[in-house]
Amino acid sequence: MNSLRTGRARRTRASGLDMTPLIDMVFILLIFFIVTTSFVREAGVDVRRPQAHTAQTLDKANVIVAVTAKGTVHVEGRVIDVRSVRAYMERFLAEFPDGSVVIAADEDSNTGLVIRVLDGCRLAGVRNVSVAARRP
């Protein structure tokens, strides 16, 4: 009688669904998507970009620097001084040597300030600097 109970217990355990391969596959897909995702560092503020008929969609940008109409410069949700743009971009390039920067300037922003931000990026060594615009 005892051997009959042991046989039933073995059969009920063996008939369960093995979730190990499914969990392994989910983790592999998760790692794949994490590795292939391009992380964009947002500026953290909304700006009204100017219109341009020749505006093109950029595949990826690693950092977006926003220049507002009030004359403030935003990177990753923080307000930074225009004089510290170069130092910030040097640290960014140390982490992402082939990184690109998009300057999203409000259409009512000061042109001189936008040029100073652009100059700070280029002096830091950023090779790919773009200015954001929207299509009409």
Image (cartoon, rainbow, N blue to C red):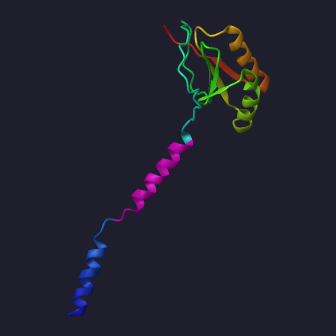
Position in image of residue 13 (x %, y %): 30, 75
Left or right placement of residue 9 versus residue 100 in this view: left
Q: Residue furthest front?
A: 70
What are the residue bounds of the magenta stretch? 18-35
Q: Is residue 36 above or below residue 131?
A: below
Q: Quadrant of residue 12?
A: bottom left
Q: Residue furthest left?
A: 1
Q: Say whether residue 32 is magenta.
A: yes
Q: Quadrant of residue 2?
A: bottom left
Q: Residue at x 55, y 13 (%)?
A: 49
Magenta span: helix, strand or loop, mainly?
Answer: helix
Left or right placement of residue 54 versus residue 95 in this view: left
Pick whichever, 86 or 77, lies toward us.
77
Q: Say whether residue 109 is magenta.
A: no
Left or right placement of residue 18 versus residue 36 in this view: left
Q: Is residue 120 above or below residue 30?
A: above
Q: Residue at x 70, y 32 (%)?
A: 98
Q: Residue at x 73, y 23 (%)?
A: 121
* Quarter the N terminus occupies: bottom left
Q: Quadrant of residue 101?
A: top right
Position in image of residue 93 (x %, y %): 73, 33
**Number of numbered discs:** 0
Position in image of residue 136 (x %, y %): 48, 7
Pick whichever, 70 or 63, lies toward us.
70
Position in image of residue 66 (x %, y %): 61, 21
Pick whichever, 131 or 4, lies toward us.
131
Say whether residue 14 is visible: yes
Q: Residue furthest right?
A: 123
Say whether residue 125 is visible: no
